[in-house]
Image (cartoon, grey):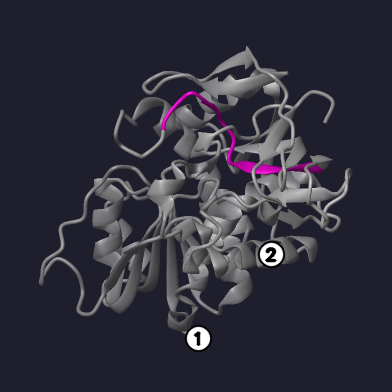
Amino acid sequence: MRALRLLEWKSDAVLVEVDEPTAGPGQVVVRIGAAGACHSDLHLMHDFIDGAVPWGPPFTLGHENAGWVDEVGAGVTRWSVGDPVAVYGPWGCGVCRRCRQGMENYCERAVEVGAAGGGLGLDGGMAERMLVPDARLLVPLDGLDPVEAAPLTDAGLTSYHAVARSLDRLVPGSTAVVIGIGGLGHMAVQFLRELSPAAIVAVDPRPSARELALELGATRAVDPADPEAIDAIRGGARAPGADLVLDLVGTTDTLALAAAVTRPLGHLTIVGIGGGQLPIGFFTIGYEVSVATTYWGFQTELMEVLALARDGKVRSHVTTFGLGDAPAAYEAMRAGTLDGRAVIVPDGA
């Protein structure tokens, strides 16, 4: 079968022929219906080097995956061939305290595991079939289309977790800022709209992204290149600033902007892996501002994200590409011409 594989760091992924996977004891093979293309894949291709993470190429890309059970290994009783499923993306050891709590994204034995998940050290879903090493990593779709569901497993889950951890800050009269209205950001706007009474400020240099944010429920949208951007984001020169800022880009410039608009006692959450740095000192951020990074989300939260999508409360805006056109999807992402999420659909899916 064909697969889009990263063969070495500092290189583009290529389409190659690989053997089809087979399910061993406790494992499941999923016939891929859709695999999301994530901006972090571009970082894998062009920014990572040997030793940056405790795993490396070669592997098949694709860590946002949904489809149908195609084969079950010995001992698997929960799933049957044909069941529609989403794949929970971060794969931990399955036995440590965090994993038992459904928090495999924060597995306490991650270094021992030697991979972060399918598409992140192990073979992912940019192929016709994908091996899932343990049936515990599957979540039922219950009526959702795989094309809609696949981006929810990362773009949806990651932004949902970043919002959910700070909901106590988002009381009536509060403000939440989303920097970067891409695959994650357009989902974050929707979760903020559905889960909180906060005013939502979207920040993005692209007019089309700002327009999408307003359509999805943002209160206002701001171009960060505007000389008055900081005041516009804060809500005026005398406004106290934002109670929650989600930086989904993570460059030095966006982090500086985030720090400038976060009010005292607010949360500044760094989600994007743009390689920037935020100097922390007594006078560089507001009093009692909490700065945190987040990584993905919990399996129970994925179930909540899928439930919101089934109820029609949120949806991922997608552009679909065939597997043969997957390189073009990444080129569009790199050029900044893609709104929402690119989703790769294998031929015949």
- On screen, residue 44 versus residue 218, left or right, reads left
Q: Quadrant of residue 31?
A: top right
Q: Which residue is found at the position 74% from the left and 37% from the top?
A: 23
Q: Which residue is found at the position 72% from the left and 37% from the top?
A: 34
Disc 1 target residue: 172
Which segment is the magenta one? 56-68
Q: How crowded is mark 2: few (under 14 residues within 10 Å), some or many (20 or more)?
A: some
Q: Is mark 1 on a helix, strand or loop?
A: loop
Tell me: residue 130, above or below residue 273: above
Tell me: residue 196, above or below residue 100: below
- Which of the two labelled residues, at mark 2 and mark 1, occupies the earlier sequence position? 1
Residue 339 lies, in percent from the top left, at 58, 40
Q: What element carries label 2?
A: helix
Question: Depth check: 236 or 82 in front?
Answer: 82
Question: Depth check: 123 or 297 in front?
Answer: 123
Q: Which residue is found at the position 38% from the left and 23% from the top?
A: 9
> Magenta stretch: residue 63 in it?
yes
Spatial CA distance of label 2 from label 1 is 27 Å
Disc 2 target residue: 303
Q: In which quarter of the image is residue 279?
A: bottom left
